[in-house]
Amino acid sequence: MATGERASVGGLIVVYVLLLVLLAGSIGLSHVDLGLVSPLGILGIAGLQAALIMAVYMGLRWSSPLVRVVAIGGVFFLSFLVVLLLADYLTRGMA
Amino acid sequence: MGNAEIEVPFEHFESLEQQRDAARVGIWLFLATETLLFGAIFTSFGLYHRLFPDAFSAASRSLAWELEAWNTVVLLSSGFTMALCDHYAAELKRGKVILTLGLTILLGLTFLVLKGVEYRGDYVDGQVPFLPGGWHYSGPDPSHAALFFNFYFLLTGLHAAHMVIGISLLSILFVRAIRWRSQFRVRSMLVGVGLFWAFIDVVWLFIYSSLYLINRPGGA
């Protein structure tokens, strides 16, 4: 899959096909009534696609630890924002 | 010039590796701020979706998900050609860099044209709450459906604006790749623009999933 510090052309093609298959899976899931599983599955697939793109297309798999920490830090700060915002909104009126 | 050019780091870096790492860290820091920008809008969207689930679900089902499925394929393809371009740039293969850059620009423009077609359809169907004559929505709870469509245009519009910026940067790189005066400069610029373009792909995948798909007939 890799040629030293980056993905090989074959690896990029495999990821591209995987992304399309996951997209098809996501669309398929949106047409099946599985209750909460459908929307959560669709968002989970989007997360998986994002992880694939970040790891291979954006080269995180071959990046230095410093670059990885900064990249994951962005997601980490987003999780702070989401969790603290939800902790406020979802607990209003509970006291 | 050409293949005789030797890449040396700028004077404030100890090595080329350190210089490239610094560039990557800078771009990722920028992308972290972009993540927070889009993340805040997504979070607000999620909260309002929870407050008005029926209005948001009905409004979501009126969007052109089939058209945007093809648009997603177009965008994923552009992400693939951009990754290929980055790969060939690292090998300093000028012809393949020009070809893949051109393809990426064409696919990006195709995405924007299809987006324009969808926006036109939204206007004809009366789903544009902020335009005069653009709002005659016939679904349930129009006032809260209008909120959904405001989120929809904010997210897709902001994404499209990023696409326009990305295509502009790619076009500058395309010209530079044709000139090929400094192959290493082209390569280092490509790394930054490539990361930005892949980020646009990632954002779109979440936009498509949350605005178009999770409320389809099978969705909750």
Image (cartoon, grey):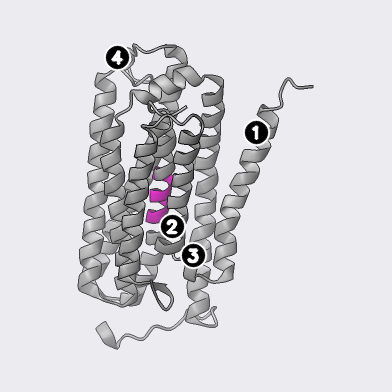
Report how many numbered discs are placed on residues in the image: 4
Label annotation for residue B133: 4
Disc 4 element: loop
Residue B128 higher or lower than B19, as above or below: above
Question: Does label 1 or label 3 sit earlier along the sequence?
Answer: 3
Label annotation for residue A60: 3
* Cα distance between the residues tagged 1 and 3: 30 Å
Q: Is residue B165 visible?
A: no
Inspect the magenta stretch and tell me whether residue B206 lies in it. no
**Which residue in the rendered view is the most extreme toward the right?**
A95
In the image, what residue type sits under mark 3?
Leu
Which chain does the residue under circle 2 lie in? A
In the image, what residue type sits under mark 2?
Leu
In the image, what residue type sits under mark 1?
Leu
Binning the other alpha carbons within 10 Å of mark 4 as few (below 14), some (14 to 19) or many (20 upward) gives few
Question: Does label 2 or label 3 sit earlier along the sequence?
Answer: 2
Q: Evaluate if marks 3 and 4 touch, with contact meaning CB atoms under 8 Å apart.
A: no
Q: Is residue B128 left or right of residue A88?
A: left
Disc 3 element: helix
Residue A40 higher or lower than B179, as above or below: above
**Where does label 2 land, which residue?**
A52
Q: Nearer the viewer, mark 4 or mark 1?
A: 1
Binning the other alpha carbons within 10 Å of mark 3 as few (below 14), some (14 to 19) or many (20 upward) gives many
Highlighted range, magenta: B197-204
Marks 3 and 4 share the same chain? no
Marks 4 and 1 share the same chain? no
Q: Position of residue B20 (x, y in %)?
A: 47, 73
Give whichever of B170, B108 is nearer the camera: B108
Q: Nearer the viewer, mark 2 or mark 3?
A: 2
**Where does label 1 land, which residue?**
A86
